[in-house]
Amino acid sequence: MRKISLFIATSLDGYIAKPNDDLSFLKLVEKEGEDYGYAEFTDTIDTLIIGRRTYDYVLKEIGSSHYDNGKRDVYVITRTERPQIGRTIFYTGNITELVKRLKSEKGKNIYCDGGAQVINELLKNDLIDELIISVIPVLLGNGTRLFKDGRPEQILEFIEAKTFDTGLTQLHYKRKK
């Protein structure tokens, strides 16, 4: 069975975006030639799930090829129906049903890249198998929280922690079965 992994960055105080979906704090740890394991991780996936606001931000800042590289399916979770663009599908249905269907199909693993609403819906339904969280050395004080209230408690198994000279610490956990 395919697994679904969260690979995301957060501030030390638990925010994945500043107000107005601002991700500029990620630039604090940008370093030439350092991708914090992102390319290695994305080699293990062929499907990506992302919230529409995160998708729109990345589209504006980086471009659509960041997600749809022609080698993977991209599901943008949205309330507004839009036609498919390349391998990017704008999905308006039940996200739990989508993930259960995707997990049952053959293929590589599935990557959840946010946003917070998508992550927390998947956590509520115990659908995230692995969490790779990069902690950026900054206290933002406000913004979009990575973890929302109202989820059941989940015990995780520690895999590893990596530290980088930029001050970023990457925590890797998997769901205890």
Image (cartoon, rainbow, N blue to C red):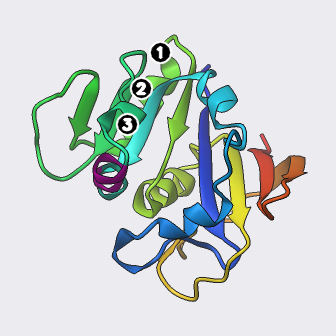
Element class at badge 3? helix
Q: In terms of image quadrants, where is residue 39?
A: top right
Q: Amino acid at mark 3?
A: Glu
Which residue occupies the extreme top position in the image?
Answer: 106
Q: Amino acid at mark 1?
A: Glu
- Circles 1 and 2, Cβ within 8 Å, touching? The answer is yes
Q: Residue at x 37, y 36 (%)?
A: 97
Task: Identify the residue position indicated by label 1 in the image.
Answer: 105
Does residue 170 lie above or below 86 as drawn?
below
Task: Identify the residue position indicated by label 3 in the image.
Answer: 97
Q: Position of residue 24 (x, y in %)?
A: 48, 67
Element class at badge 1? loop
- Circles 2 and 3, Cβ within 8 Å, touching? The answer is yes
Which residue occupies the extreme bottom position in the image?
Answer: 141
Extent of the magenta region: 56-61
Task: Identify the residue position indicated by label 2 in the image.
Answer: 101
Of labels 1 and 3, the one closer to you: 1
Residue 73 magenta: no
Q: Quadrant of the N terminus?
A: top right
Residue 39 in sight in this render: yes
Q: Residue at x 22, y 38 (%)?
A: 90
